[in-house]
Image (cartoon, rainbow, N blue to C red):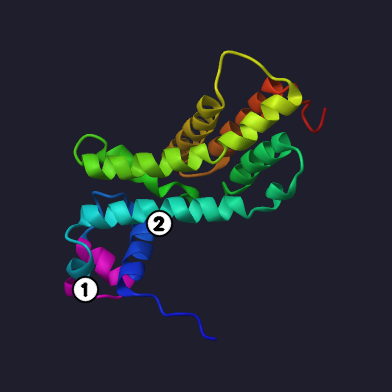
Amino acid sequence: MAPAKETAREKLIGAAVKVVRERGFNATSVDELCREAGVTKGAFFHHFPSKTDLGIAAAEAWKLHANALFGSAPYMAHEDPLDRFLGYLEFRRDMLTGEVSEFTCLAGTIVQESYETLPDLREACHDSIWGHALTLVPDIEAARARHGIGGAWTSESLALHTQAVLQGAFILAKASHGAAAARDSADHLIRYVRMLFNKPEKDA
């Protein structure tokens, strides 16, 4: 059976993901989004009262896309939850290649511009970033129990720390117009987690 054709709404969300990652939210116009999606301005306003409403929908779609992508990644087959967690981090590092706009985070890009001026959009980005981070918590918690790791920190705080490092890495990539510094930051995060769980580096 032939795959279902994309609706105008889906095309607009896809256009927002692409163009906003390239240009930023504020610099992206409704006209540009319509042009990228191949739809009319009337179709835009039929589905979204404003660009902000499209941004909210795009942030939600981005979260669902990320959860599906990482939830079905090869590292999920590891039996040890620590290996799954480290596999996630290595997978994220290995994605840091090519054009900067192709690996940076839509929600992180939007929230840097909207955190004070567009509270509804900020909340959507918060839900996207936090929601994805929290998918790591069960494996971190299970890894702590399996490997006997205590300490005055929570699995949720470590999950959020991974996103803080990765979002910061994206900023470094944008500032340097390349992935090298971002990959270095991801490598340091992996080393940190290995030390936290008393697991030697692979080349040790």
Residue 43: give its label.
1
Horizontally, residue 167 falls left or right of residue 90, namely: left
Give the x, y percent position of residue 189.
60, 29
Residue sitting at x 22%, y 39%? 119
128 sits to left or right of 36 = right
Residue ID at (56%, 55%): 69
Q: What is the CA distance from the residue labelled 2 to the residue labelled 1?
A: 19 Å
Q: Residue furthest top?
A: 152
Q: Residue furthest bottom?
A: 1
Q: Secondary structure at mark 1?
A: helix
Q: Position of residue 47 (x, y in %)?
A: 23, 67
Asked if the magenta segment contains residue 34, the reply would be yes
User: Horizontal and vertical percent for residue 140?
Assistant: 63, 32
Q: Where's residue 115, x and y in %?
A: 27, 36
Q: Earlier in the sequence, mark 2 or mark 1?
A: 1
Give, as a single range, the part of the protein colored magenta. Answer: 30-42
Q: Name the kind of residue labelled 2 in the image.
A: Ala
Residue located beneath label 2 in the image = 61
Vertical position of residue 16 compared to residue 178: above or below: below
The amino acid beneath tag 1 is Ala
Tell me the crowding category of disc 1: few under 14, some 14 to 19, or many 20 or more residues within 10 angstroms, Cα based: some
Q: Residue at x 32, y 71 (%)?
A: 37
Up/down of 76 relative to 44, above or below:
above
Count of marks overlaid on the render: 2
- In the shown orientation, is residue 125 left or right of residue 73? left
Residue 136 numbered mark, or none: none
